[in-house]
Amino acid sequence: MLPTGHPHSYDWLLQETKISLNLPKLTKVKLKLLEKAEFLSASDKLELLGLLLHIWFTGELKVKIDKNLSHLLNRLGLAWFINSYRHSKKGLIKWLQVSANEQINQFIKKHSRTMSPMEAGVLYNYPVADILAFMKLINRKTKHPKTPVGYYFGKVHSIDLYNQSYQEYNLRWQLIKKTSPIIYRELLKHYQDKSS
């Protein structure tokens, strides 16, 4: 492997000995809590279920934090914080950053303004070809099929390796369907409502 340049820049993470590195486990109780969370959209449930299934390691919710949501996130064992950036035209944009553990959140808090697209792509667990396409290192396309998989997974793809990425996204979609038919049906309904 090539030298990575500045491995010492992550030494501060190792000093946080009280922070658990464990990933949350999906249990039947957690799945029921998520399925019954009527205050969440189908897309937000997908984000949280993906974290609990370790499909990705960080995600974003577009909802305001309240006691119901903070209680749910704590019961699910997910780390979260309010993240933001100032957009040149839209002003301050805020969202809820939710991660598989507190260590990942600490990394995002410290490096969100300096993180490379490669690092962000790994945390959001995009296929490598899509990360390289996003970085314009290989040919890219931004069109995706008008299917639920195309709607919910990834927006920038490699032209040459698109079939591999789509196959990976389809496997993720099938895992969601198998794990929670309830959330799967909510996602289908949301997709159909949006596309009609």
Image: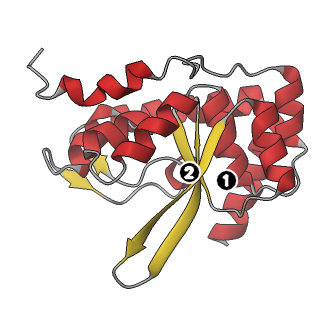
Query: Which residue corresponds to the image point at 36% horizontal and 60% vertical from the top-left?
Result: 143
Residue 188 vs 131, above or below: the answer is: below
Location of the C terminus (image quadrant): bottom right
Horizontal and vertical percent position of residue 73: 75, 40
Residue 123 vs 19, above or below: the answer is: below
Image quadrant in which you'd find residue 173: top right
Query: Which residue corresponds to the image point at 47% horizontal and 37% vertical from the top-left?
Result: 106
Inspect this view and state whether residue 182 appears. no
**Colour scheme used in the picture?**
secondary structure
Asked whether 153 or 117 is in front, the reply is 117
Image quadrant in which you'd find residue 167: top left
Judging by the rendered image, the residue that carries numbered circle 1 is 43
Inspect this view and state whether residue 38 appears. yes
Q: Amino acid at mark 2?
A: Tyr
**SS for tag 1?**
helix
Query: Which residue corresponds to the image point at 8% horizontal and 19% vertical from the top-left?
Result: 2
Tags 2 and 1 touching, CB below 8 Å: yes
Location of the N terminus (image quadrant): top left
Q: Amino acid at mark 1?
A: Ser
Q: Which mark is residue 174?
A: none
Name the side, left or right, on which 121 lies relative to 65. left
Query: Which residue corresponds to the image point at 35% horizontal and 27% vertical from the top-left?
Result: 12
Horizontal and vertical percent position of residue 5: 10, 28
Marked residue nearer the N-terminal end (2 or 1): 1
User: Residues under labels 2 and 1: Cα distance?
Assistant: 8 Å
Give the number of the mark in front: 2 or 1.
1
**SS for tag 2?**
helix
Horizontal and vertical percent position of residue 74: 77, 36
Q: Which mark is residue 152?
A: 2
Residue 77 vs 88, above or below: the answer is: above
Name the side, left or right, on which 2 lies relative to 126. left
